[in-house]
C-alpha cells in the first residue's frame, strides 16, 4: 500500500479539530452556522458560494471579516467572543484556500472594537434571583456560584464526578472542560442539600442535572423577569446578568484570597501556574477559608468572620486549659475545693 499524499491531506483536514473539547467544537460549529446566516442575510448568498468568489481575490476576504465584526458589535457580543468567532471564521476560510493571515490588516479590523465595562453581580441580586427560581435553577445557581464551573461543565456533570468529603468535591473531567485540563473544585455548605437531591437514586454514569444549556438560559431569563432584574447594557441588547455571571461571581469573590486560588479552581491559566500544586487537603482548607465570601443567604462579612475566628481560637485555648486542669484534679494536684474558683476566674469570651 503506497502513501497517497492527496488522500492523507484530505483525511487530516476532515479530522482537524477533533482534539477540541466538545463545548469548543459546538461553539465553532455554531459560529460557522451563524456566519453562513450572516452571509445569506447580508449578501443573499451561501458561504460556500462566497468562498468560491474569494478564490480569485483574497483581499475581499478582509472586507467580509470587517462587515461580520461590525455586525457582531451591533449585537452587543463581548469582545473576547467576537475575537474567538473571528478566529473560527478565518480558520475556516484558510482551510478552503483563503489565506487572510496579514496581521496588520486583521489587527486593524479587531483593534477598533470598543470594550465596555461588565456589571458584576452582587450577593443581593443572586438572592433575589434564587427567591424567584424553581428548585432546579436554585441548585444550578448555588452550585455554579460556589464552584466556578462553566455552564458546559455544570450541565455535563456526572454523578461519579462528585465526591462527598467535608464539602462536596467536584472533579472536572478533561473531556468536559474548555481547556482540556482536569481540575478539582468544591461546592459550598449552603448548596449541599440542593445538590444531594439530584445525586440520589442515580448511577455513576448518569448526568446530575436534567437540563441543557438553553434550558438553563430560558429558566434564568424567567427568574430575572420575576425578580425585576432583566436589565440590558446601554450599548447593546445583551443582558447584564447571564449564566456566566455566577462563574464570574465566584472568581471575583475567591479573588479576595491571596494569589490566584480562585482562578485555579475556576480553570483559568496564569503565569507560573505550573507551580500551583495544591494537595486535595490544601485545596479544601483554602476553599473553606474563603467560603464565607460565596455565601448568599447566610452571609458573614469579613469583620465578623475575623472576630468569630479569633473567638474560636480563644475557645480552643480555654478548652485545652480546662482539660489540663481536669487532669491535674484527677491526679490530686489541685484540691477539689479550689476547682470551682479556678473555673470562675477564667476570662469570659464574647463576640463584639
Image (tube, grey):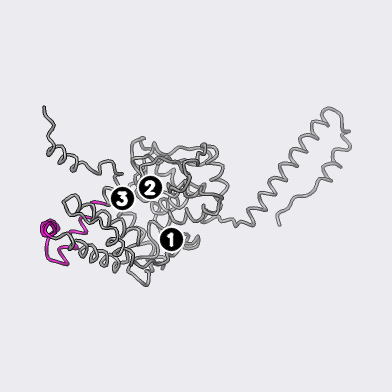
Quadrant containing the N terminus is top left
Q: Earlier in the sequence, mark 3 or mark 2?
A: 2
Q: Which residue is mark 3?
A: 212
Gap in angstroms between the C-alphas marked 3 and 2: 10 Å
Residue at horizontal 40 percent and vertical 51 percent from the top = 140
Q: Residue 178: give x, y in percent of width and height.
A: 35, 47
Residue at horizontal 39 percent and vertical 69 percent from the top = 231
Front-most of residues 303 and 198: 303
Mark 1 lies on a secondary structure that is helix
Front-most of residues 285 and 136: 285
Q: Residue 150: give x, y in percent of width and height.
A: 38, 50
Res 12 seen here: yes
Q: Is residue 42 above or below residue 81?
A: below
The furthest residue to the bottom: 234
Q: Residue 249: give x, y in percent of width and height.
A: 46, 56
Q: Which residue is mark 2?
A: 154
Is 42 covered by the magenta stretch?
yes
Q: Residue 153: give x, y in percent of width and height.
A: 37, 46
Q: Earlier in the sequence, mark 2 or mark 1?
A: 1
- The disc at residue 129 is 1
Front-most of residues 330 and 156: 156
User: Dot 1 surroundings within 10 Å: few (below 14), some, or many (20 or more)?
Assistant: many
Which is more foreground, mark 2 or mark 1?
2
Is 150 covered by the magenta stretch?
no
Q: Quadrant of residue 21?
A: top left
Residue interval drawn in magenta: 28-56
Mark 3 lies on a secondary structure that is loop
Amino acid at each position: 500500500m503506497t502513501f497517497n499524499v492527496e488522500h492523507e491531506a484530505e483525511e487530516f483536514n476532515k479530522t482537524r479539530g477533533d482534539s477540541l473539547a466538545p463545548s469548543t467544537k459546538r461553539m465553532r460549529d455554531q459560529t460557522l452556522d451563524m456566519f453562513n446566516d450572516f452571509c445569506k442575510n447580508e449578501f443573499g448568498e451561501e458561504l460556500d458560494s462566497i468562498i468560491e468568489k474569494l478564490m480569485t481575490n483574497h483581499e475581499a476576504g478582509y472586507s467580509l471579516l470587517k462587515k461580520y465584526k461590525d455586525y457582531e458589535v451591533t449585537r452587543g457580543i463581548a469582545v473576547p467572543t467576537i475575537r474567538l468567532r473571528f478566529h473560527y471564521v478565518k480558520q475556516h476560510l484558510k482551510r478552503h484556500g483563503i489565506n487572510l493571515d496579514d496581521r496588520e490588516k486583521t489587527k486593524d479590523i479587531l483593534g477598533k472594537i470598543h470594550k465596555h465595562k461588565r456589571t458584576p453581580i452582587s450577593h443581593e441580586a443572586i438572592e433575589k434571583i434564587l427567591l424567584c427560581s424553581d428548585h432546579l435553577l436554585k441548585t444550578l445557581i448555588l452550585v455554579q456560584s460556589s464552584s466556578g464551573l462553566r455552564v458546559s461543565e455544570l450541565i455535563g456533570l456526572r454523578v461519579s464526578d462528585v465526591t462527598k468529603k467535608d464539602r462536596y468535591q467536584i472533579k472536572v473531567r478533561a473531556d468536559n472542560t474548555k481547556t482540556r485540563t482536569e481540575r478539582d473544585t468544591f461546592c459550598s455548605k449552603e448548596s449541599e442539600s440542593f445538590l444531594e437531591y439530584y445525586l440520589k437514586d442515580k448511577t455513576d454514569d448518569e448526568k446530575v442535572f436534567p437540563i441543557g444549556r438553553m434550558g438553563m438560559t430560558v429558566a434564568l431569563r424567567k427568574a430575572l423577569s420575576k425578580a425585576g432584574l432583566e436589565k440590558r447594557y446601554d450599548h447593546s441588547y445583551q443582558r447584564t446578568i447571564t449564566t456566566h455571571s455566577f462563574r464570574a461571581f465566584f472568581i471575583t469573590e475567591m479573588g479576595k484570597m491571596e494569589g490566584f486560588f480562585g482562578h485555579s479552581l475556576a480553570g483559568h491559566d496564569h503565569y507560573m501556574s505550573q507551580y500551583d500544586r495544591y494537595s486535595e487537603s490544601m485545596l479544601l482548607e483554602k476553599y473553606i477559608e474563603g467560603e464565607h465570601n460565596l455565601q448568599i443567604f447566610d452571609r458573614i462579612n469579613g469583620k465578623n468572620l475575623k472576630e468569630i475566628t479569633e473567638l474560636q481560637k480563644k475557645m480552643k485555648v480555654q478548652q485545652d486549659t480546662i482539660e489540663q486542669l481536669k487532669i491535674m484534679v484527677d491526679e490530686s494536684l489541685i484540691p477539689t475545693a479550689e476547682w470551682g474558683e479556678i473555673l470562675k476566674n477564667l476570662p469570659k469570651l464574647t463576640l463584639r
